[in-house]
Image (cartoon, rainbow, N blue to C red):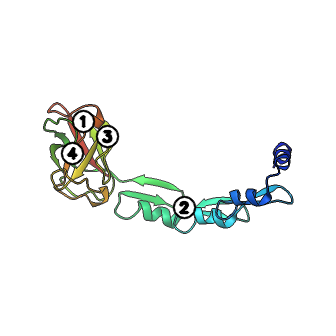
Amino acid sequence: MDDAISAAVAAAAIPDSYIRSLFVDGNGLNYNASTGVFSTDDAYIRSLFVDGNGLNYNASTGEFSTDDAYIRSLVGAGRGIAYNALTGTVAVAAPQTGNRHQTSTATIGNEAATGITLAAAPKGLIILAVNGKIESIGDGVKTQRAYFSADGGTTAKMLSSLAAGDTLYWNGTVAGYDLDANDTVDIYYI
């Protein structure tokens, strides 16, 4: 601690046990009452970044490195994205086609069916563009500008479980505008 803080702590007679309770026991820092010095809790830092969380922490050097196997599990096999561990680069495959240049039925307000259904089950990422502008899609929620449903709009589907025939629903109130026959809707499968 710097001298001003140390003096304030001493003057206030704050017990060391209270200071330790703030920083030790799973909070990432250790406090040495005799020296007034804080140090990182390496075990806690490792618990945040290792064991499947995408980063490795080297306590002896204090450096972080990527967990290449974890990154490959997120972006590899069948998701349209390839990760090169040697170079640390990510490549995106060319998008599939199937729902390009679609026209919506007129929508009013939220939870409005567009009449647009998925031509195929996406194998990876899906991007929605209305008149060339990328719009948000709810992932199991109906609070974004759009969402997909297989039950007449009652339940928003998780993006990971989309299937051919799922219908696109538009939330005009959320988006700030409704759709009509003059709007072009593109769904990109990546």
Which residue shows up at 27% across the image and 44% down it? 146
Residue nearer the viewer, 55 or 96: 55
> What amino acid is at disc 3?
Glu
Cβ atoms at labels 4 and 2 below 8 Å apart: no
* Residue carrying label 4: 169
Q: Is residue 126 above or below residue 70?
A: above
Of labels 1 and 2, the one closer to you: 1
Q: Quadrant of residue 105?
A: top left
> What amino acid is at disc 1?
Gly
Circle nearer the N terminus (3, 4) = 3
Per the model, the C-alpha gap separating discs 4 and 1 is: 10 Å
* Residue carrying label 2: 86
Of labels 3 and 1, the one closer to you: 1
* Residue carrying label 1: 172
Asked if residue 62 can be seen in this view, the reply is: no
> What amino acid is at disc 4?
Tyr
> What amino acid is at disc 2?
Leu
